[in-house]
Amino acid sequence: MLIKRLKRGDTLIVTELSRLSRTLLDIMSILNICMEKEITIYSTKDGYAFDNNINSKVLAFAFGLVAEIEHNLISLRTKEALALKKAEGKRIGRPVGSRVKLQKLVDDKKRVLSLIKQGASIAHICREYQVSRGVFYLFRNQYAV
């Protein structure tokens, strides 16, 4: 974790305090650790430097609270929009049966099975075919012996 690597007198530059965490409690916890270590946090968007003084603490609390409220409102609007689409009968997410990534492995099935038998790592196969482990496991469960 970055915070553990910072030392007294360092400066942590962030675009805004909300980038430290999504919750006010976490932001304040990170700021507290930084203040105890005498690390200054500089927010480029707001143009503020947060160090170990009362003004910084008050501003940090205010910015953190605004960030959490904003995140909660975005989440609420997204959930409402998805619920509305569902209520209208529209399908949410990837179409049923859509296996675009899995198809990469299926198209080269002989080679993938050969790699598995040769003991190639899952990470290697996933990197080579640019698929996730989940997609690899789907393939393996369906085709590998």
Image (cartoon, rainbow, N blue to C red):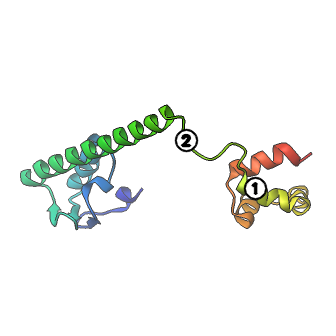
The residue that mark 1 highlights is 122
The amino acid marked with disc number 2 is Ile
The residue that mark 2 highlights is 92
Residue under the point 73% across and 45% down: 97
- The disc placed on residue 102 is none
Instruction: Look at the image and tell me whether residue 16 can be seen.
Output: yes
For the C terminus, which image quadrant?
top right
Residue lying farthest front?
Answer: 88
Residue under the point 7% across and 50% down: 54
For the N terminus, which image quadrant?
bottom left
Residue under the point 57% across and 44% down: 93
In this picture, is 69 found above or below 50?
above
Occupied quadrant, residue 12? bottom left
Residue under the point 29% across and 50% down: 30
In this picture, is 105 found above or below 137?
below
Task: Please state which of residues 23 and 53 is positioned toward the viewer in this rendering.
Answer: 23
Occupied quadrant, residue 11? bottom left
Q: Is residue 26 left or right of residue 9?
A: right
Whole-percent x, y for residue 31 in the image: 24, 51
Residues packed near mark 2 inside 10 Å, few (<14), some (14 to 19) or many (20 plus): few
